[in-house]
Structure formats: C-alpha cells, structure tokens
Image: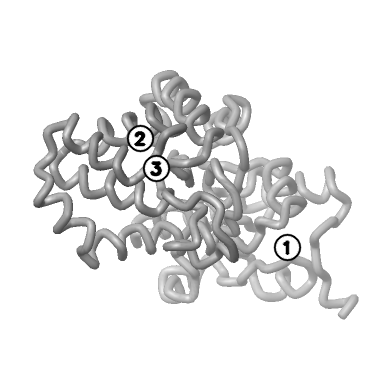
Amino acid sequence: ITVYIYTDFQCPWCKRAHTHVLDLAHKFEKQVKFVRKDFPLDIACNSSMTSAFHPLACRASYYAKCAGKQNKYWRFHDEIYNNQEILSEETLINISKLLSIDINEMHYCLTSPEIADSIKREIDEGIKYKIDGTPAFRIFGEIIVGAITEDIIKDYLNNYPYITAEILNRIFDNKFIDNVQLLDIREASEYKTEHLLTAINIPIGKLQDRIKELDQSKTVIIYGNDELVADSDKAFNILKNNGVKEILILSKNLSRWKTLYKHKNLISTKSL
C-alpha cells in the first residue's frame, strides 16, 4: 500500500514527521511505500492560501526539486530541514554550493515551467483531497493530519485488500467520503432498496463494459451482495486488470456495516 505525505519545508512539525516516517518506512519496508508531496503553505504558489504564512516554502520546494535534477534531492531535502530555523534565499544558495550543485543549471531550472508545474500538480492534488495543513498523510481516501500511527497503517495492512466497516465509518465521520469512489456491484433492484451514500451502481455483470463510469483517480471501494462474496473478488480483479490503481473491498459487504451502525449513512429510496 502507499502512504502519501503532504509536507512543507518551513513547517517544524513536518521536520519532526520526517524522522518518524523514516522509522515507519524501515519497519514496513516490504509492505508500504511512502511518497512525499510538496504542499508549501505559501501564497506564492499555493492557491488555497489567502495570506502569507511560510514565505520561503515555495522557493525551498523549487530548489529541492531542481537539486533532484542533479540527483541530489534527498541530500538537499535534509539540508533544508537542518537549516530550517535560518532558512533564506542565501541559505538555499549556500546549500547548493555545499552539495557541489551546478549553480548555473540550478538558476535555469528555478525559472523553468516544468518545476513550477510539477509542484502545482502536487498542491492541486492536496487541495482536491481537502488538505489544509501540514504534515498530512493520505492512505487511500483517508486523510490524517499531524502524524500517522503504526495502528492506522496496520488497520489497512491486516485486512488488505479488504477495508473494515470501522475504517469506512471513520472516513464517513471525518467527511472524507468524497475522496473515494464507492462501487455497488449488486443488481439495480437491490441498490434502489438501500445503498451507501455517494455509491455508484454498476452490476457485476456489466462492470467490464461500464468501467469508464468510475472516477479512477479515487480509491474504489467495492461492496456487493452478502450471499455472493465471490462477486466482490471478481470485481476487484476486473478493476485491477483495467489499470485501476487503488482498490479496496468492504469486508462482509453491507451486513457488517448495518450490524455496527444500524443503517447509518445508508439511503433508502423508500424515504425519498
């Protein structure tokens, strides 16, 4: 599984979180991939910011990305954090010299649309997932702000590719349900009787032909008929074979959900 980290070079908590993530990456090295994403809380490049907060965060992200062009991203990354309290344009230039980075190439890179576009894509992704502070962690559609714990990671690892009703309820409660694509693979008549809010209905027999109706940029969470558990596994394989990257199956379909939450977050056409 993959954990995405949205972070800011001027954020003191991001510096602390980085050390914690290194420990987690070592502990779960065969099971979890951690991917860093730039989300500078700086009005200079982050359209979600309404006022100045970390005035050098965008610039630091540009420098680090450009250092990566010379195969020195992580060394530059670490030096920024080592000098976080005295960060300035001069500090960034001095780090470049310390790491023997070609200054002419660095200056050319800093003005290139490629680097600005790369960071903008990561910021836009964070905004899409409702990131409004750092550090923030995304594991499938769930967002955790501040710190991610071993227990949360194990919640997913111990059940993958299944997701428990408890985790899905947490996603509903924290208003992250728009970050995932719920897929109801039952027949239309069952779907009309009751279904999870926001779920799209594509019966298993039609999934191969209608797969383009899914928002594949989101984690797809499948649920089906309690008596036909194999259909969910079949749907998983169809999605996987068609290139969908993040797929989960609701463990025990709707039965576990209804037992625990008494129809919470279900909608019935009878009540409309």
Of badges 1 and 3, nearer the viewer stands 3
Q: Tell me if I can see residue 144 in this picture.
A: yes
Circle 2 is placed at which residue position? 80
- Find residue 64 and report its horizontal and vertical position in percent: 28, 44
Q: Is residue 185 above or below residue 38?
A: below
Amino acid type at image mark 1: Leu
Q: Earlier in the sequence, mark 1 or mark 3?
A: 3
Amino acid type at image mark 3: Arg
Q: Residue at x 14, y 58 (%)?
A: 108
In the picture provided, is 96 more to the left or to the right than 193? left
In the rendered image, the residue lying farthest to the bottom is 272
Q: What quarter of the picture does the C terminus occupy?
A: bottom right
Which residue is more in the foreground, 215 or 196?
215
- Number of numbered markers: 3
Q: CA distance from mark 1 to mark 3?
A: 32 Å
Which residue is more in the foreground, 207 or 97?
97
Of badges 1 and 2, nearer the viewer stands 2
Q: Tell me if I can see residue 180 in this picture.
A: no
Considering the numbered disc 2 on the image, is that residue within a helix, a strand or a loop?
Answer: helix
In the picture provided, is 116 more to the left or to the right than 43? left
Circle 3 is placed at which residue position? 36
Considering the numbered disc 1 on the image, is that residue within a helix, a strand or a loop?
Answer: strand
Which residue is more in the foreground, 44 or 164?
44
Q: Residues within 10 Å of mark 3 (few under 14, many from 20)?
A: few
Q: CA distance from mark 3 to mark 2?
A: 15 Å
Q: Residues within 10 Å of mark 2 (few under 14, many from 20)?
A: many
- Do residues under tags 1 and 3 come within 8 Å of each other at their CB atoms? no
Q: What quarter of the picture does the N terminus occupy?
A: top left
Circle 1 is placed at which residue position? 196
Q: Earlier in the sequence, mark 1 or mark 2?
A: 2
- Find residue 202 and report its horizontal and vertical position in percent: 56, 71
User: Residue 227 bears which disc, if any?
Assistant: none
